Amino acid sequence: MNTTLAKQELLIAPCGMNCGICIGYLREKNKCNGCNSKVGFKANHCKNCSIKNCEHIKTSPSGFCYDCEKYPCKRLKQLDKRYRTKYRMSMIENLNKIKTSGMAEFLKSENEKWKCPNCGSRLSAHRESCLNCGSV
């Protein structure tokens, strides 16, 4: 895997969230380094995340929720419902794609899905318009 894909892979949280499309990661001020980062700033809700800190994740061969016997657990279902409703994405769909198609294929589809058609910048799941050019 090339260096860019390896860096992108580190931005995929155990719940299936692509931290690379999170407003916390994309913003300039108080930039979050992503769920899996061991250094730098990380939002408190990420540090204290019940999914990231789940005892099953720590023993999972993949490090993702899809390996858990409780998958999808109540917490993941709640998070997924909120993200499908508010942010037009699904953690459970992401996890299923990673499991069935592999990380490289998932990252390839994410790079296309979250690319601004106007300027090519990375879009945020948390904003309706491009942070770079403002197009919707």
Image (tube, helix red, strand yellow):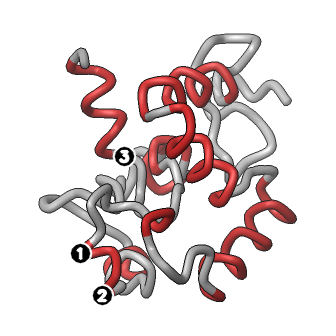
Q: Is residue 5 left or right of residue 95?
A: left
Residue marked by disc 1: 59
Judging from the image, what secondary structure is the residue with disc 2 in?
A: helix
For badge 3, the amino acid type reads Leu
* Residue closer to the observer: 99 or 131: 99
Residue at the spot x=81%, y=60% of the render? 84
Mark linked to residue 129 = none
Contact? badges 3 and 2 (CB < 8 Å):
no
Dot placed on the residue nearer the N-terminal end, 3 or 1? 3
Q: List x then y, in percent, for residue 40.
A: 17, 59
Q: Gap between marks 3 and 1, in whole Å?
A: 19 Å
Dot placed on the residue nearer the N-terminal end, 3 or 2? 3
Contact? badges 1 and 2 (CB < 8 Å):
yes
For badge 1, the amino acid type reads Thr
Q: Gap between marks 3 and 2, in whole Å?
A: 20 Å
Residue marked by disc 2: 55
Say which quarter of the image contains residue 13. bottom left
